[in-house]
Image (cartoon, rainbow, N blue to C red):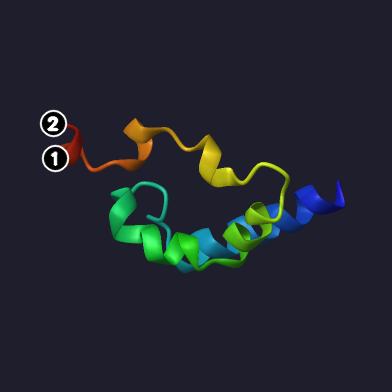
Amino acid sequence: MVVERKLNILRREMFEADPVLITAPHYEKLDKLLNSALFDCLKMMPKPAIHHTHLTATADVKYLV
């Protein structure tokens, strides 16, 4: 519960700072995502979040085509 609350706070702060963070093309926001406190927390978990990212959700459409 404590971890979930902390992650939700970090997530909310990111969305308040940049409302289009999750709807913009991934590569446009990659630096901001990788340098966030939320990503730092996820990297410390036993299986980092990067392993749960799907190619179609992260790759630019032009690259996939």
Residue 36 image position (x, y, % from top left): 54, 66
Q: Residue at x 75, y 58 (%)?
A: 6
> In the picture provided, is 58 more to the left or to the right than 43?
left
Kind of residue at disc 1: Lys
Answer with the quarter of the image where residue 40 lies: bottom right
> In the picture provided, is 60 more to the left or to the right than 21?
left
Q: CA distance from mark 2 to mark 1?
A: 5 Å
Residue 22 image position (x, y, % from top left): 42, 48
Answer with the quarter of the image where residue 56 lies: top left
Of the pair 36 and 22, the residue shown nearer to us: 36
Q: How dense is the environment of label 2, judged by Cα within 10 Å: few (below 14), some, or many (20 and up)?
A: few
Residue 14 image position (x, y, % from top left): 53, 63
Judged from the image, the secondary structure of the residue bearing numbered disc 1 is helix
Q: Residue at x 61, y 66 (%)?
A: 37
> Which residue is labeled 1 in the image?
62
Q: How dense is the environment of label 1, judged by Cα within 10 Å: few (below 14), some, or many (20 and up)?
A: few
On screen, 8 above or below 35? above
> Which residue is labeled 2 in the image?
65
Q: Residue at x 48, y 62 (%)?
A: 34
Kind of residue at disc 2: Val
Q: Quadrant of the C terminus?
A: top left
Of the pair 46 and 42, the residue shown nearer to us: 46
Q: Residue at x 70, y 54 (%)?
A: 7
Answer with the quarter of the image where residue 43 lies: bottom right
Residue 51 image position (x, y, % from top left): 54, 39
> In the picture provided, is 21 more to the left or to the right than 3?
left
Residue contact at pointers 2 and 1, CB within 8 angstroms = yes
In the rendered image, the residue lying farthest to the right is 1
Judged from the image, the secondary structure of the residue bearing numbered disc 2 is loop
